Amino acid sequence: MHKILFVCHGNIIRSPMAEFVMKDLVRKAGRETEFEIASAATSTEELGNPVYPPARRKLAEHGVGCAGKTARQMRRGDYDAYDLLIGMDDENLRNIRRICGGDPDGKIRLLLDYTARPGPVADPWYTRDFDATWRDVEAGCRALLNRLT
């Protein structure tokens, strides 16, 4: 069983996009029983809020639903509960390590580290470019799934 937690600042755009893209890819590959996939925030700003409407629309454009998802904050115990904690940018990684008290088992990674172009996932909160975020998330999730299967 692969247990993956995607993490971003507020858990309303990038990490839920990654959560639901990964769930969709795993479902299409017929491997749902092999994965537990979730997402969380490093901050408290958006707790309880649904996926940001433009992100929801971008997922829907690609036939990916995210109904019922609300932002939750990452907890220290998530480090032990998940095999991988996947951040979207370096600030996320710093905050994940702070929450978890470090990374003794090497579980904390950037999503795009699994691709041929490592770096941060585009943040549409500032750019409004949800297409770029979709491309990054989809490429990262495909590469991660390929690595794990």
Image (tube, rainbow, N blue to C red):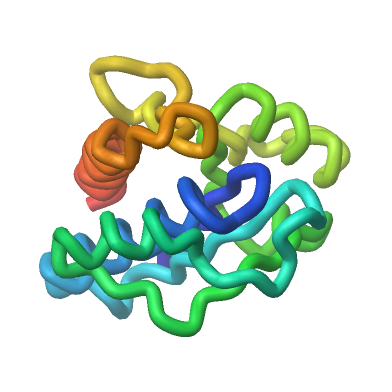
Determine whether 41 is above or below 135 in the image: below
User: Looking at the figure, which quarter contains the N terminus?
Assistant: bottom left
**Residue 146 position by quadrant:** top left
For the point 60% across and 44% down, the residue is 8
Which sits in the foreground, 60 or 91?
60
Q: Is residue 72 left or right of residue 37?
A: right
The picture places residue 105, in percent across and down from the top left corner, at 67, 38
The picture places residue 123, in percent across and down from the top left corner, at 48, 32
* Residue 72 in sight from this viewpoint: yes
* Residue 147 in sight from this viewpoint: no
For the point 61% across and 36% down, the residue is 108
The picture places residue 128, in percent across and down from the top left corner, at 41, 35
Determine whether 27 is above or below 127 in the image: below
Q: In this view, does 143 lie to the left or right of 78?
A: left
**Residue 55 position by quadrant:** bottom left
Q: In this view, does 141 lie to the left or right of 36?
A: left
- Looking at the rendered structure, the number of numbered marks drawn on it comes to 0
For the point 79% across and 62% down, the residue is 77
Which sits in the foreground, 68 or 3?
68
Which sits in the foreground, 102 or 15?
15
Which sits in the foreground, 45 or 102?
45
Determine whether 144 is above or below 2 in the image: above
For the point 22% across and 52% down, the residue is 149
The picture places residue 119, in percent across and down from the top left corner, at 43, 18
